Each structure stands twice: as structure tokens, then as C-alpha cells.
Image (spheres, helix red, strand yellow):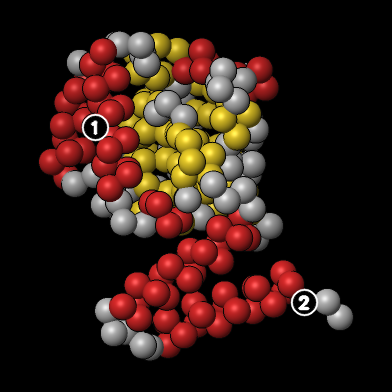
Amino acid sequence: MILLEGVLAAEDVARVRRDLDAAPWIDGKTTAGPAAREVKQNRQAAGDDPLVQAIEKFVLEAIHRHPLFSVAARPRRLSRLLFSSYEGGETYGLHTDDALMGAALLRSDLAFTLFLTDPETYEGGALTVTSPLGDQAIKLAAGDMVLYPAGSIHAVAPVTSGRRLACVGWIQSTVRDAAQRELLFDLANARALFARGEVNRESLLLLDRAQSNLLRMWAET
């Protein structure tokens, strides 16, 4: 998982939330696959509404501007963005995302959640991603975004008070393999540190990890 801080500034979050308050909302089950539909209980902004489409364009441009987005995701295609709302016990139970999405059959390599409400304004609602090390519960500040594997088992815990607003979407990467994307991400970060003259333990560790992972990928014994 990779955290992207400050994808939306505070004033941009306020604008998006204000516009979403004026937007029409529909049952979230309408955009879920057959299995996920059984565990999905939320509302989504109607994607065919012109106001929602304008919000989507605004947020998408902000995501692409973030300096870490392109090096972390290596995006080739993005899905339509979905704006979701949870309150009054609404939840999204354990599920995994469809591998191919939409009429264009976008391959979902990565998923992302961009938080639009601060965690202290609602109870519950953590994004929980299952990993070999156990469940990781994620609640970020409004404007922050997390990238995670679309093939993971994940859920949104019930929101027991307040309202949780978020934007979600999926990415088809130009680099299909997650380990190769991680290698490129390490190298890009190390290069950025060196370009700033920061030859330190952090930059050297990134190079060490990239070198070791390349050796694991290529070495024959």
C-alpha cells in the first residue's frame, strides 16, 4: 500500500463536499458485481449527473497532479471515479474487486480510496485491507489517498455515527507486475533524493532494496 498525502487541499475538499451535497445519490449496489452486491450497503453519487461528472473531472485532475501518483501507479487507464457515502450503520463487507471492469475491460491492477471527511467526524468506516500480516485498518485525513492491490480482500467497516465520504477508483497500470512496480517506485524515489543532494541512509536503502529485488528476480542458483 502507498499513501499519497494532500491529493486535495483543504479548500478543494470543501468544494467537492459542497458540490456533492447538491448532487443526486443512488443505491451503491448498482455499481457492484454480483458477489459484492450482497455485502454492499452505501450510497453513491449518480455518475450520469452533470454536476457529479464535473466533480469527477476536478478530482481526477488533482490525482494526476500529485507527484507520487504516476511513479507509484504507472497508470495506463483509470476507471470512472465513484463518490460513496456511508452513514447510519452502512458498510461494505469483505469482497475483492472484479479483475476486468466496464465495457472497455479495464484490468484492475490497483484500487484507491481518496478520503473526503476527516476521521474524527465519524465513527467506524475504516478501510480494512487483508494482507499476509493481518488486517490493516486505514482512516486517513480528508484529502489523502491510499493505493492498494485491487485483488486484495478488503472491506469498509460499518459507520456507526457521522458520515464518511470518499472517492474510489481503479487503475490499469502500464506495469502489470506489482513487484516490478515496487522496484520502479524505489528507483524513482532514490533518484529524487539524489537529485536533491540527499545522499543518506534512506536513499541508499532504497537502492539496496532495488538491487536485492532485481537479483532475486534474475538470479539462478
Amino acid type, mark 2: Ala
Answer left or right for 217 relative to 75.
Answer: right
Label 2: how many Cα within 10 Å (few below 14, some 14–19, many 20+): few
Residue drawn at (43%, 57%), measured in percent from left and top? 71
Residue 63, image quadrant: top left
Residue drawn at (65%, 73%), measured in percent from left and top? 214
Q: Is residue 160 visible?
A: no
Label 1: how many Cα within 10 Å (few below 14, some 14–19, many 20+): some
Residue drawn at (48%, 41%), measured in percent from left and top? 76
Residue drawn at (35%, 81%), measured in percent from left and top? 194
Image x and y of residue 81, in percent: 40, 28
Q: Residue furthest right?
A: 221
Look at mark 2 in the image and give the residue it sits on.
219
Nearest to N terminus: mark 2 or mark 1? 1
Q: Secondary structure at mark 2?
A: loop
Image height of 103 relative to 198, above or below:
above
Q: Is residue 136 visible?
A: yes
Q: Are marks 2 and 1 in contact (CB under 8 Å)?
A: no
Image height of 52 relative to 58, above or below:
above
Image x and y of residue 107, in percent: 60, 34
Look at mark 1 in the image and give the residue it sits on.
58
Picture quarter with the C terminus:
bottom right
